[in-house]
Image (cartoon, grey):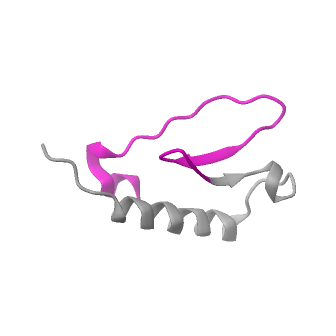
């Protein structure tokens, strides 16, 4: 998925404490483990997040080179 965004898509992983696991895209929270019952996402939830991320990436304006 991220390969489709080319050089305009980057991933940043920031270590958390006490089991914090959150996914953000452009400052918008897509997933928060604590808010979703303190469980890690199962395959269905991962696919949902991927679809959300892909939709937002596709909708983003293309940067001029």
The residue at 14%/47% (across/down) is 64
Magenta-drawn segment: 1-29
Name the image quarter holding residue 43: bottom right
User: Is 54 above or below relative to 40?
Assistant: below
Query: Where, by quadrant of the figure, is residue 20 drawn?
Result: top right
Residue at the extreme left of the image, as rendered: 65
Q: Residue at x 43, y 67 (%)?
A: 55
State yes or no: residue 30 in magenta: no
Q: Is residue 18 left or right of residue 1?
A: right
- Which percent across, then down, holds residue 41? 73, 59
Q: Is residue 40 left or right of residue 62?
A: right
Q: Position of residue 24 (x, y in %)?
A: 57, 47
In this orientation, which residue lies closer to the viewer: 40 or 59? 59
- Closer to the camera in the image, 6 or 55: 55
Residue 42 is left or right of residue 30, and the answer is right
- Pinpoint residue 52: horizontal percent, then vertical percent: 52, 65
Q: Residue at x 53, y 44 (%)?
A: 27
User: In this rendering, would 9 be left or right of 37?
Assistant: left
- Figure quadrant of residue 15: top right
Instruction: Report the residue that reaches farthest toward the right.
Output: 37
């Amino acid at each position: 998925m991220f390969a489709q965004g080319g050089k305009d898509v980057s991933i940043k992983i920031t270590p958390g404490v006490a089991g914090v696991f959150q996914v953000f895209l452009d400052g918008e929270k897509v997933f928060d483990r604590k808010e979703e019952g303190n469980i890690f996402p199962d395959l269905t939830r991962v696919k949902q997040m991927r679809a959300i991320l892909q939709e937002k990436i596709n909708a983003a304006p293309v940067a001029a080179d």
